[in-house]
Image (cartoon, rainbow, N blue to C red):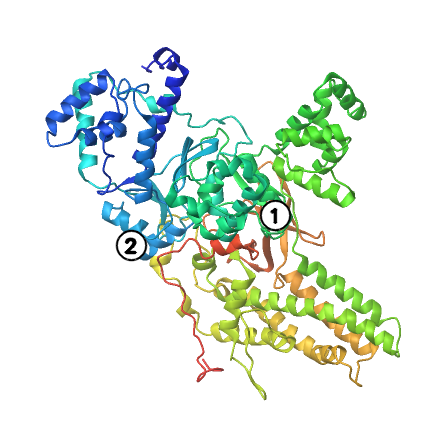
């Protein structure tokens, strides 16, 4: 039978008593959620400052009998850790709440109460290095070893904000308690993507011993069952039904922004919200020096955990506003395709499991498992057109839409019209409606657009905030083709070039050949990484061009000698045209050599997924540790042939020679035919590389067609609007292959099919950013990386 709920107003009718009880409950949560060490001692005089209720006095009498050597102060600390049983054990009206807050403050500063920094991957990496063979939970000594020399965690219950600067008061109510588990361990099964949290432990010292005895004494003295007073006094999820709740923001901050970016956020807050933040900075003499001075001076002195704690003093809305101002000014750089969402998600206390994510368009809150953007759009229109006169105006705007009522016509219009057009036609139809849109979306920092470009950007932001994916393609491919067209345009204006013609051609050629080198560099790097990396166990089907280039440079450097020495490749990206052109045939030759002995690349049984030999429904298609071996013979032959032809055709058109003669004031300036031949060969080669996927091309989800049997065709679209069709559902869903419909940027390789299927090989595209650097090579796995033959200077060019 369900227990009757306690009426807090009946038990504590006085609002001040309730506030004090809530404060003590928050302190209790922060103590019991942190890691209590042997060094934690009660403050002197605590026994006089913590006044028990009648029930608390009974429990303390029994505790004194069980542990006669304990002091009054120690028993009072145990009472704080116990807090309640059937009734409250601490009298909130007579207890000195400020004194126990001061004690908590001291314990945090001296480190006798430790708070683990659970954001990001710091503890994950430390666990990996410190406990290579550990599979269970951690002892207290192991917990201290894990937390040693790591940042202090930042947590909050109510407005009580704790961290490396002790106890501070936040403007924002939050429930972000310390965690008794740390998200640090992935299992060794390469197919497992689940995080296995590890429990951390308190010291088995006197404080915990007294708490255990107090638990027994309470059960002995009070025959009634315990009641969850903490749940009654502390609001675990104040925004439970708010689908725009920013409850996830503290976790998001610590896991999605680099230390440098967090410093910029705090600096922005101290500059624009100084009147709100500065009065709440630490007052202690030992801390005051760190937080005195200009915003620049303060940010420069603090450590990352101190920075985060000061950020959390501000309201969540102010923090988001500061982040978006920094993104707008490109102080925080977010690439076109990047959507920041931490790979580690904590358990959320919201009915829709909403979490924060961030892109060029700012911070938004989206459900992890539901699609609600259309529902939000309908609601937004209703909120904007809320008055009777507005409803009449909305009816007029929808006069050509069929429906019995304005509501039904709106529903039909929203479902039949592009969301961008809905926003433009309805929400941007007047300044009053636009301001109401800002208010409904809580966008206090948004400004009225001044021109068409700003208006288009604003529409994208509104759609992004609602939950729609806004697709922005990387600029490198578009620029390449635009610059090729420009070079041909100026080269075709004459046949016998005058000096002015040559200047115009040189000007266009400089930009074009920069784009060509960039495109060839991306293609060669990606192709090498595509064919020779272990994507199942190592890359996890995530492609970053910087990592791919470094991979390519290690694999291809020194493999071919010329009269000027061996061809080398730079991992920094400073690769010039000639070695890039030769690199494709070098890669083709290496692939042919590797295919001669495929058995050395077979994946050992210990690296196979747990399900592999236990069923026949889903099989692992990646039996080899380099992708080249997993491809069909037809795919391999086609790719190797295309690599050879890339070098042959660019060499035959003298592309390197034409480039050199264009860029310098030489008497042998190329004529129109030479330029056109070179550009024609480049266009043909790059077109083929792009079509095959060896020139890495970004695609976004564009639609889905389903038949009555659930079989589907997913439509993907690239930067030119070209569509690619792929099968749905995937036959390889347990292999780590990215979903075709998750809305993120994908690199798809039409020339390479997943082994034994008609399904395209594909990768998540990760652009260079602070966020990408934070999560590079995550998660770390406990199995061997494929051994690849490296070439020392003495053996370059041989096997």
Seen in the image, is 486 located left or right of residue 616?
A: right
Above or below 379: residue 713: below
* Residue position marked by numbered label 2 in the rendering: 131
Q: Would you say the residues marked 2 and 1 are in contact, meaning their CB atoms lie under 8 Å apart?
A: no
- The image quarter containing residue 462 is top right
Quadrant in which the C terminus is drawn: bottom left
Q: Pointer 1: residues within 10 angstroms few (<14), some, or many (20+)?
A: some
Above or below 508: residue 747: above
Q: Is 739 or 36 nearer to us in this picture?
A: 36
Above or below 107: residue 432: above
Seen in the image, is 67 located left or right of residue 516?
A: left
Q: Position of residue 371 (x, y in %)?
A: 57, 34
Query: What residue lies at 44% left-to-right and 50% top-to-bottom?
Result: 302
| Res. 327 mark | 1
Q: Earlier in the sequence, mark 2 or mark 1?
A: 2
Quadrant in which the N terminus is drawn: top left
Seen in the image, is 423 located left or right of residue 280?
A: right
Element marked by disc 1: helix
């Amino acid at each position: 039978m369900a227990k009757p709920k306690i009426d807090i107003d009946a038990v504590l009718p006085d609002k001040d008593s309730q506030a004090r009880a809530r404060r003590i409950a928050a302190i209790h949560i922060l103590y019991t959620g942190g890691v209590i060490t042997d060094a934690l001692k009660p403050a002197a005089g605590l026994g006089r400052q913590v006044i028990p209720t009648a029930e608390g006095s009974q429990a303390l009498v029994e505790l004194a009998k069980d542990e006669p050597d304990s002091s009054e102060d120690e028993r009072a600390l145990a009472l704080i850790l116990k807090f309640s049983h059937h009734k409250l054990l601490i009298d909130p009206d007579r207890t000195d709440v400020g004194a126990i807050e001061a004690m908590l403050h001291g314990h945090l500063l001296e480190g006798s109460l430790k708070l683990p920094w659970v954001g990001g991957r710091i503890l994950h990496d430390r666990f990996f290095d410190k406990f290579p063979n550990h599979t269970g939970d951690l002892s207290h000594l192991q917990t201290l070893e894990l937390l040693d020399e790591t940042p202090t965690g930042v947590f909050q219950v109510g407005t009580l904000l704790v961290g490396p600067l002790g106890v501070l008061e936040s403007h924002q109510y939050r429930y972000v308690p310390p965690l008794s588990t740390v998200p640090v361990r992935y299992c060794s099964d390469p197919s497992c993507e689940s995080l296995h949290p590890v429990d951390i432990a308190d010291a088995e010292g006197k404080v915990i011993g007294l708490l255990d005895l107090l638990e027994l004494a309470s059960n002995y003295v009070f025959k009634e069952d315990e009641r969850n007073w903490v749940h009654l006094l502390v609001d675990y999820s104040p925004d439970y039904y708010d689908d725009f709740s920013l409850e996830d923001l503290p976790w998001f901050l610590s896991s999605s922004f680099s230390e440098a970016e967090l410093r910029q956020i705090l600096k922005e807050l101290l500059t624009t919200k100084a009147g709100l933040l500065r009065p709440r900075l630490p007052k202690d003499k030992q801390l005051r020096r760190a937080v005195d001075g200009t915003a620049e001076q303060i940010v420069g002195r603090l450590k990352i955990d101190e920075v985060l704690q000061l950020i959390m003093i501000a309201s969540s809305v102010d923090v988001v506003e500061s982040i978006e101002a920094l993104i707008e000014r490109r102080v925080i750089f977010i690439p076109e395709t990047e959507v920041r969402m931490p790979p580690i998600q904590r358990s959320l206390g919201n009915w829709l499991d909403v979490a924060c994510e961030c892109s060029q368009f700012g911070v938004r809150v989206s459900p992890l498992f539901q699609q609600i953007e259309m529902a939000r759009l309908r609601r937004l229109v209703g909120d904007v057109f809320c008055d009777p006169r507005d409803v009449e105006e909305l009816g007029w705007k929808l006069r050509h839409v069929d429906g019995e009522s304005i509501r039904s016509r709106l529903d039909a219009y929203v479902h039949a019209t592009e969301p961008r057009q809905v926003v433009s036609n309805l929400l941007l139809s007047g300044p009053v409606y636009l301001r109401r849109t800002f208010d409904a979306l809580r966008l206090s920092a948004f400004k009225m657009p001044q021109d068409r470009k700003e208006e288009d950007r604003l529409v994208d932001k509104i759609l992004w905030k609602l939950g729609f994916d806004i697709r922005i393609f990387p600029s490198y491919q578009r620029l390449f083709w635009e610059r090729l067209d420009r070079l041909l345009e100026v080269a075709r204006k004459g046949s016998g070039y005058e000096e002015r013609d040559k200047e115009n051609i040189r000007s266009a050629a400089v930009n074009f050949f920069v784009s060509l080198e960039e495109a060839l560099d991306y293609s060669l790097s990606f192709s090498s990484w595509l064919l020779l990396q272990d994507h199942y166990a190592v890359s996890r089907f995530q492609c970053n061009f910087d990592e791919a280039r470094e991979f390519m440079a290690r694999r291809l450097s020194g493999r071919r000698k010329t009269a000027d020495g061996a061809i080398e490749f730079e991992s920094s990206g400073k690769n010039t045209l000639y070695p890039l052109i030769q690199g494709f045939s070098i890669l083709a030759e290496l692939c042919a050599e590797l295919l001669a002995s495929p058995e050395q690349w077979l994946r050992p049984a210990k690296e196979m997924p747990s399900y592999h030999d236990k069923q026949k429904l889903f099989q692992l298609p990646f039996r080899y540790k380099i992708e080249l071996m997993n491809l069909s013979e037809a795919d391999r032959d086609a790719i190797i042939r295309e690599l050879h032809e890339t070098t042959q055709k660019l060499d035959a058109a003298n592309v390197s020679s034409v480039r050199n003669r264009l860029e310098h004031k030489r008497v042998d300036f190329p004529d129109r035919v030479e330029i056109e031949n070179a550009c024609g060969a480049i266009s043909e080669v790059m077109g083929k590389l792009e079509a095959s996927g060896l020139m890495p091309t970004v695609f976004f989800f564009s639609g889905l067609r389903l038949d009555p049997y659930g079989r589907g065709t997913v439509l993907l679209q690239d930067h030119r609007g070209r569509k690619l069709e792929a099968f749905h559902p995937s036959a390889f869903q347990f292999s780590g292959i990215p979903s075709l419909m998750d809305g993120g940027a994908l690199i798809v390789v039409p020339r390479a099919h997943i082994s034994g299927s008609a399904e395209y090989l594909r990768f998540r595209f990760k652009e260079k950013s602070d966020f990408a650097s934070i999560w590079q090579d995550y998660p770390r796995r406990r199995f061997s990386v494929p051994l690849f033959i490296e070439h020392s200077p003495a053996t370059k060019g041989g096997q």
